[in-house]
Image: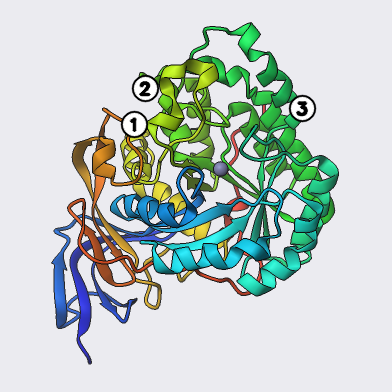
Amino acid sequence: MTKFDLLIRNAKAVIPGDQIVSADIGIRGGLIAAIGADLGAAEQIVDAKGLPVIPGIFDPHTHIGNENSFESEAESETRAAILGGVTTIGIFLRSLEDSYTIHMPGFRKAMDERSYVDSIFHPQIFTEQQIAEIPLIADQYGIRSFKFYMSGMPGIVNSIADDRLLEGFKAVASLGPDAVACVHCETGALVTRARESLPQRKPEGTVADWTDAHPAEAEALAIQTALYLAKIAGAHLYVVHLSSRDGLEVVRAGRRAGHRFTVETTSLFLSLNTADENGMLIKMSPPVRAAEHGDALWQGLAEHSINTIGTDNTSRVRASKRPWAGLHGSRPGQPLLGTHLPSLLHFGRLRGIPLERLIDAATRAPAMTFGLYPRKGTIAVGSDADLVIIDPNLERRVDAADLQGMSDFSAFENKVLRGWPIMTIKGGTIIARDHRIVAPANGRYLPRAPAAAPDLAWLSTVLPPQG
Ligand SMILES: [Zn+2]
């Protein structure tokens, strides 16, 4: 038996959807080669000292290149990611007008040459031409997921109307049962009216008033519409960043009605609420809401109404975030990759959510949804050796400089979070250790081949009694 390249001893291996086992993990050729006791010799040995070892976090929801260039953020933001225990990301690509065929080679090159994490792409679809190109893009670039905005953001992304959404769903469904239609669910007309009248209604608004610009009923109504249109088209709907209790109620109704769809929330929405002392730094679209919405989202996660957790990372610097400009002058978006896992560990513990439930939603569920399971999202022989050792009791105060992305602020800044990664192994190589980068980036863009429909076993949601 040849030696292992790397052996992790004394791991408490958290295997999503299965169990937590005490074992050693042997790695060879970038893959997990063995799990068990007394595995034998290795070039390099790491003693996990009984700490949890989890699959690398798969963040299905990021935006790269909204502030600096795509190429620059492909490096800087994935550096923050790998330090934070994230090893795979889904990137929502943006091309408001152009055909994606123009930009795709550049996006791919950046992720192949500069990224610390592996990546998949979800192109955002705005135009009729882009809808018509969905089969071509899928075929040429190995893409199985696309995104649609029912409500855009002025100056950032455009909304699409229901007719175009239905056409888009049909195009995605035509790719096969594994293809996914990701949707930002807010009813555009309701948000536009609320947002446009906000300065008159709340001239001295706080971040709590931002929820008035994105009323929860706009999210709830849009999910109903998207569920209906996806059913007509036969498309697998993936609701991105669920933010409200009202939206969750529609999700529950949809499950009771037998719809097959997948729901994501974000670590930001699970962690913070509008009473937060960081004010405009937490401003996001959709918004961080009042505490009762966060309570509902945790309940939704516990009962499996919510399936995946992403970040919606949209990195900015303070100078463009403009927190000093108040509600009407500051911009939505913040870097979240570096705090994703620590915030989940910290607030998940406070909520009494089992570690394995959290890790499942942050690893296996996105990997299954987006066609990368069991290569990603689990600890199994043959899977990519993307592993993170976490110290559930390590406390660190969040400081943007430590996160090592491009940004000079964090939505979590000055908060002490308990539970941090202390080592990130990506493709069998230790890339981050004790919050330092110790090896070159080895991330790759991952084209996806058509596959069978994902196993949506989690749709056997344990719903609370109706009423
Ligand atoms: Zn987003």
For the residue marked with disc 3, what is the amino acid? Answer: Ala
The answer to whether the residues at label 2 and label 1 have Cβ atoms under 8 Å apart is yes
Dividing the picture into quarters, in which one does residue 247 lie?
Answer: top right
Gap between marks 1 and 3, in whole Å?
A: 32 Å
Vertical position of residue 289 compared to residue 311: above or below? above
Ligand 1 is within 8 Å of the C-beta of the residue at disc 2: no
30, above or below 350, in the image: below
Q: What residue would you read off at disc 1? A: 412
Q: Where is residue 427 in the image (x, y as percent from the top left)?
A: 34, 71
- Residue at point 26%, 27% (across, down): 414
Q: Assess mark 3: CB under 8 A from ligand 1?
A: no
Which residue appears at 33% of the width and 32% of the height?
Answer: 350
Q: Nearer the viewer, residue 126 or 354?
A: 126
Q: Provide the residue designation for mark 2.
A: 278
Specify which label sits upstream in the sequence, 1 or 3.
3
User: What residue lies at 64% left-to-right and 14% top-to-bottom?
Assistant: 198
The reply, left or right, for residue 144 in relation to residue 356 is right
Q: Name the residue under label 3.
A: 189
Q: Nearer the viewer, residue 161 or 31?
A: 161
SS for tag 3? helix
**Label 2 packing within 10 angstroms: few (<14), some (14-19), many (20+):** some
Q: Going by the picture, which residue comes out furthest to the bottom? A: 1
Query: Does dot 1 land on a helix, a strand or a loop?
Result: loop
- Residue 465 seen in this snapshot: no
Q: In which quarter of the image is the C terminus?
A: top right
Instruction: Residue type at mark 1: give it.
Output: Phe
Q: Position of residue 182 (x, y in %)?
A: 65, 50
Image height check: is 79 above or below 114? above
